[in-house]
Image (cartoon, rainbow, N blue to C red):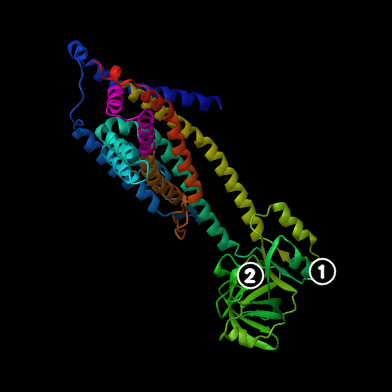
């Protein structure tokens, strides 16, 4: 803890010192005569420095290339173990390349903020001017922001940093959550399978509030024989209908294809995977290909009942309610699931999928809660930065406020103009920050996914992002309250005096 605090202190002091070097150099270059001369209003915004433009474009382009490189890379198999992709020349993991690329791209975006943020604020002001009661105020606020692009970019950048950071972690967490859940659904496509249920067990599963639904499986006793085996292995054959039981599974791969048979772990050890097997049951004999499914109870196999399938036509299993697929309610805890399994008389009940989902949901929720609480500090710091910048801008805009009052604008209208301007700058920062956060969040998750067959799909948590937007807009409005109040109190005569 002390080491982390020391590192944070050193980095903070170092960044502050570094950021103050260029302003100090510029201030030192001002001659005394120029400093004492009266300063008038600029006729137009200063020209954007060419060096800054080229540096911003270069950094943004290089950072974007690094982020996409990290996000689109795939893992590799080393000694039978899948490892995340690395840069062969440097030996750096792709996640490090992605982080460096995101930092480079964001610095480039900050350098170009003066070209992007003010026009965006002006456009948002024009859009907001169509809202009844905000026409003149919104348009004036947008034009004010465009006329002073440096001040607008500096104010919005304080919030842009916090919004980008929060959006990156929020969207990245949702994308990782979706990826983990998809892989979990593929590994554990059903909540539970129960075999050998008594009438009391069937009644319990039918009436218990923790159970969402059940689907009855056909059941028959049979044997499996391998092509090179002399002895047969006794198995319990379960038959499911993929069409009528589609809503019972979390992933469609649970049901074997026609001509395939899924086997429990112990049966796989005896028969093997991918081999041609002979299944004998109900006086019929058919040839099937074995595949593994460790979610089946011991000594059981599963085939699909599909119309036109030779497997289904050859078997006529009983449906007496002793074998069920169980779908549990979402949001159950590990204790609730274990309690339900303990109440059943049958020992051939497997609830592998439900506990795995419950443990993953709990882990993700805890991790996301910790991250969001820590990132809340970023929004607080950003709001303080916006408030400070707006407060300083009021000192520079006394004549502007006095002129608005002199031409007939009321105090309330002047205060509303400052508040709307703050909201417009916050909205611009939210748009740019959310777009960058979506890119960085997706690339961050994709760069650490080791399996080449894992497809990382961008997942945007609209509810959480909506809460971030509302919090940021409300914080910007709160930050503008004191500067707007001070601006509205400027007297026309005093403000216009030399």
Quadrant containing the C terminus in the rendered view: top left
* Figure quadrant of residue 396: top left
Element under label 1?
Answer: helix
Q: Which mark is residue 268?
A: 2
Membership of 421 in magenta stretch: yes
Q: Is residue 474 left or right of residue 422?
A: right
- Residue at 56% from the left image edge and 80% from the top image edge: 258
Q: Which mark is residue 200?
A: 1
Quadrant containing the N terminus in the rendered view: top right
Is residue 461 visible in this depiction of the protein?
Answer: no
Main SS of residues in magenta: helix
Q: Which mark is residue 446?
A: none
Total number of numbered discs in the rendering: 2
- Residue at 66% from the left image edge and 60% from the top image edge: 329
Region in magenta: 396-425
Front residue (pair 487, 207): 487
Q: Is residue 182 above or below residue 107?
A: below
Membership of 362 in magenta stretch: no
Toward the front, the furthest residue is: 408
Q: In front: mark 1 or mark 2?
A: 1
Mark 1 vs mark 2, CA separation in Å: 32 Å
Q: Is residue 390 left or right of residue 8?
A: left
Q: Position of residue 475 (x, y in %)?
A: 46, 34
Q: Residues within 10 Å of mark 1 (few under 14, many from 20)?
A: few
Query: Counting residues from the N terminus, which is met first, the one under dot 1 or under dot 2?
Result: 1
Q: Position of residue 149 (x, y in %)?
A: 27, 33
Element under label 2?
Answer: helix
């Amino acid at each position: 803890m002390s080491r982390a605090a020391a590192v944070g202190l050193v980095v903070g002091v170092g960044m502050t010192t570094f950021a103050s070097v260029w302003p100090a150099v510029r201030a030192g270059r001002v001659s005394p005569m120029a400093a004492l001369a009266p300063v008038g209003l600029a006729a137009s915004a200063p020209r954007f420095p060419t060096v800054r433009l080229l540096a911003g474009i270069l950094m943004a382009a290089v950072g974007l290339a690094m982020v996409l490189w990290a996000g689109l890379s795939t893992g590799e198999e080393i000694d039978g173990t899948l490892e995340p992709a690395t840069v062969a020349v440097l030996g750096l993991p792709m996640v490090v390349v992605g982080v460096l690329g995101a930092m480079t791209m964001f610095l480039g975006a900050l350098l170009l903020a003066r070209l992007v943020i003010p026009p965006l604020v002006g456009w948002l002001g024009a859009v907001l001017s169509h809202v009844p009661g905000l026409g003149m105020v919104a348009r004036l606020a947008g034009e004010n922001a465009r006329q002073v692009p440096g001040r607008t970019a500096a104010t919005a950048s304080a919030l842009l940093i916090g919004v980008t950071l929060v959006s990156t972690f929020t969207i990245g967490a949702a994308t990782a959550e979706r990826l983990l859940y998809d892989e979990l659904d593929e590994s554990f496509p059903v909540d539970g399978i129960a075999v050998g249920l008594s009438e009391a067990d069937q009644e319990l599963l039918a009436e218990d509030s923790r159970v969402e639904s059940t689907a009855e499986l056909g059941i028959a006793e049979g044997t499996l024989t391998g092509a090179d085996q002399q002895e047969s292995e006794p198995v319990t054959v379960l038959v499911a209908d993929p069409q009528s039981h589609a809503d019972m599974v979390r992933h469609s791969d649970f049901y074997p294809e026609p001509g395939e048979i899924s086997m429990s772990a112990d049966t796989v050890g005896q028969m093997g995977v991918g081999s041609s097997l002979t299944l004998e049951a109900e006086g019929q004999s058919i040839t099937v290909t074995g595949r593994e499914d460790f979610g089946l109870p011991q000594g059981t196999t599963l085939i699909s009942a599909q119309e036109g399938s030779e497997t289904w036509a050859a078997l006529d299993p009983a449906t007496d309610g002793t074998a069920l697929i169980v779908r549990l309610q979402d949001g159950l805890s590990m204790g609730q699931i274990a309690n339900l399994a303990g109440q059943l008389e049958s020992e051939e009940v497997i609830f592998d999928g439900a506990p795995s989902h419950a443990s993953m949901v709990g882990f993700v929720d805890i991790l996301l809660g910790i991250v969001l609480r820590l990132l809340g500090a970023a929004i607080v710091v950003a709001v303080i930065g916006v408030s400070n910048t707006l407060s300083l801008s009021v000192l520079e805009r006394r004549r502007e406020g006095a002129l608005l009052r002199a031409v007939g604008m009321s105090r309330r209208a002047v205060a509303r103009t400052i508040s709307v301007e703050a909201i417009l700058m916050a909205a611009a920062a939210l748009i740019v920050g959310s777009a960058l956060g979506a890119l960085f969040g997706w690339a961050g998750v994709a760069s650490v996914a080791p399996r080449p067959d894992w497809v990382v799909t961008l997942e945007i948590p609209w509810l959480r992002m909506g809460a971030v937007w509302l919090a940021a807009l409300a914080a910007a409005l709160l930050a503008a309250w004191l500067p707007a109040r001070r601006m509205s109190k400027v007297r026309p005569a005093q403000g216009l005096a030399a």
